[in-house]
Image: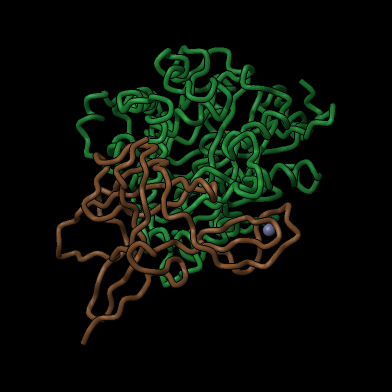
Amino acid sequence: MAADGGDGMTGEVAVLGAGMHPWGKWGRNFVDYGVAAARAALGDAGLEWRDVASIVGADTVRGGYPGYVAGATFARALGWQGARVASVYAACASGAQAVAAARAQILAGLADVVLVVGADAAPKGFFRPAGGDRPDDPDWLRFRVLGATNPTYFGLYARRRMAVHGDTVEDFAQVKVKNSALGALNPYARYRKRVSADEVAASAVVADPLRLLDICATSDGGAALVLSSLEFARRRGVAEPVRIRAVSTVTPRYPNTVLDLPDIATDSAAAAEPAAETFRASIARAAYEEAGLGPEDLSLAEVYDLSTALELQWYEDLGLCGEGEGAKLLREGATAPGGRIPVNTSGGLASFGEAVPAQAIAQVCELTWQLRGDAGDRQVEHARVGITANQGLFGHGSAVIAVR
Amino acid sequence: MPRTHTPVVAGWFTGDGDDFTLLGTRCSACTSVFFPREDGWCRNPGCAGGDLAEIPLSRRGRVWSYTDSRYRPPSPYVTDPELPWEPHTLIAVELAAERMVVLGQAAPGVTAADLTVGAEVEVVPGVLHEDGETVWTTWQWRPTGVTA
Ligand SMILES: [Zn+2]
């Protein structure tokens, strides 16, 4: 693999450190979780905060003004030391945007070492839109006009899969069974108890056909990465660092014909033919193209299982199997530990619950530990290539490919 | 004093009974259709931009998918906290002529068990909620009885 970014490929950056604050409902300010994660990542990298030339924060919309300027908020909490700062927001894809911004600075020679941090303190119950009457805001409208919570969209996707691909609620439950078993092995996960298919079936329906245990919770948590140039890593004596080889932050193409959160309708394909692939599939393809790799090269994948059914959709969008074959891939055990392509070895959102700006960074933390062979009981043997995938509200693609 | 009937969003639907339709806009240059309506500019990147004129959307379509909301949604959805929550059904409907999917609540009494993907539904006027002065109106989807 061309580590110097030759052959027309984008250059790589090294992951020197990864750190997290455990997910949960801790009831503290998001800054606490971000600082703890940042210190853990710096410790993992063997670096001091003063060694960091730039900090990129993934914003939270639930922490007041400090949340909108997360980069500076974390920098101040760690102690002002003059680092360059940026703050980014892209809903669930905020973490990938932060990684992308950090990578661009490193590859442009603007900074040798960049700290990426995301953290959130989540509300109880459903995510809700920001306050006030905002009839021009699709996110406000879908609540006001339809009472369409996030889980109702997950319910629509799940029912559609059942009708078109023959998935069953038992298939969906098996995703939870798999992910909860992995989460039980992850000290950073919020839910560390194995869940049985019977327990899923006995939980309350939230949005037909999905039950409480099919749908991810909202959590507090924080995650951080220390990224550097390959040259800096070499100088530090890190001979074989985990390297980020691709970051996909693509947007949809008109007409977007899959009903996406928070929209009330899709684009119309009456006048313009839709692209052959869906937006979600294009997120992964862009990452594969940038990395010069394909799904056949993967050792593992971390995908955004907002619901159990959505994990199956990602299998297809990542090209791990053909369209409609996600449930079959799961039933075969291919995505379980020891399978051909283990998915969500961290335990996924099923075990973490979503801490929005931290989540995409946490996905890269898991890849980092897996590729270094540091994932303990969750370790995928001979892991060499991993991908993360995720989609943020309002058209934000998010995928990272890391290699070692 | 009689209460006024006010659309929950102005300009998204019009008419009564069999004349009730959703309202979108269509670009005069490329014929792209938009719902919710775009009045400022055409969002087709391949279009140089045309005038956007209001058009009624197809009254009938096929169920793309459906679900329900078993728990009370948060504000700004308006509910009476004094009353027990009655789940409502949501239907995503594929309109053939417009080649788009439009989400809506199902007409009262329609549950997920009454629906199948591909079944035909039609748009009907409905009431979202009422308060002292106002009956807030909306659109709803109702099965026609024609199956997939
Ligand atoms: Zn146009």
Residue A194 in the image, given as x and y percentages of width and height: 29, 25
Q: Which image quadrant: the C terminus of chain A?
A: top right
Residue at image position (42%, 62%) is B21
Residue at image position (80%, 45%) is A108
- Ligand 1 picture quarter: bottom right
Decide: is A314 above or below B119: above
Residue A327 in the image, given as x and y percentages of width and height: 42, 22
Q: Which image quadrant: the N terminus of chain A?
A: top right
- Asked if residue A95 lies left or right of residue A100, the reply is left
Residue ranking furthest to the front: B18
| Residue nearest the observer in this picture, A140 or A14 | A140
| Residue nearest the observer in this picture, A371 or B147 | B147
Chain B display color: brown
Residue at image position (51%, 42%) is A223
Of all chains in the rendering, the one displayed in green is A
Residue at image position (31%, 59%) is B74
Residue A322 visible in the shown view: yes
Decide: is A15 above or below A340: below
Decide: is A67 above or below A387: below
Residue B67 in the image, given as x and y percentages of width and height: 32, 43
